[in-house]
Image: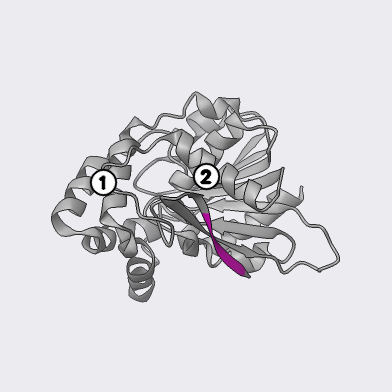
Amino acid sequence: MSKEIIHINPEVGLFCQVDNFSDPWLEVPTIIMVHGFAESSLAWYAWVPLLARNYRVIRFDMRGFGQSTPMPTEYTWTMDSLLDDITVVASHFKVDRFHLIGAKSGGSLVLQYAAKNPEKVISIISVTPPVVGAKAVPDWLRQIQEEGVKNWARSTMPGRLGSLASEQEITWWVDHVQGLTPKSTLIGYLQWVPKLDLREEVLKVRCPCLIISTSGNGLRTVESVKEWQSQMQHSSLLVIDGDAWHAAAAYPEQCAIAAIEFLEQ
């Protein structure tokens, strides 16, 4: 494993880590992983042991999150700046073509990235991605401002991780991942999220794509996912039986095994 900070400019640095446990005499494909809202690259902890045996796995903390530079409340978030960060990471590690895996809003980003950069992306795995801004955003924003980040994280975590999550699991995610996100980052980011609408953009994706959703989550139905996924070329849908709306965190092994099977096709 290697860790480093990539400095995009004097004001912004991205924390990155690389895992590669493949046979050292082999040249293996690269996967870049993009985490979701209010998270960090730590969110992929359970995926990495499975993926890194046969792939070089690059994880990074999106700007504002994890160990990357926090963003001030007044920062103007744009899709282009978030996509440019993926390009910066790929360029820094000298990879021209790669697989992309994203979860939640990170899943939205990898879909948009592939639509705009078809020459760079070999395939996509997108786990529970929103293609339009979540209706709960105004309530989340109000709660974060009034009660703080950790209280918001704890109150919403059961929905993310589902009914099978233990209290220890919920506490870990609150204390080590989402609850550590800078408040200024969350407030600024949530003011941008309602503008998200990728329903037309996802139709421009031309590479093989696996969409992973769950059967009973409270944010979006399987039918609402099928409305746009079924129109995408070269795409398939995996529905995991479960009520968590963060499948990548709640069912990491099942997701990672499905990802490997998809990548090996």
Do the residues bearing badges 1 and 2 touch, measured as CB atoms within 8 Å? no
Residue 20: name its quadrant.
bottom right
Give residue 62's position: percent from left, percent from top: 46, 51
Whether residue 211 is visible to the viewer of this picture, yes or no, is: no
Give the labeled residue for mark 1: 73
Q: Does the magenta stretch include residue 220?
A: no
Which SS class for mark 2? helix
Q: Which of 181 and 197 is in front in this view?
A: 181
| Magenta-highlighted residues | 2-6
Q: Residue 85 carries which label?
A: 2
Q: Which residue is drawn at 71% across and 48% down?
A: 95
In the displayed image of the protein, which residue is found farthest to the bottom? 168
Query: Quick check: 81 left or right of 156?
Result: right
Q: Which of 4 and 30 is in front in this view?
A: 4
Query: Quick check: 175 left or right of 148?
Result: right
Give residue 255's position: percent from left, percent from top: 57, 57
Give residue 152's position: percent from left, percent from top: 24, 58
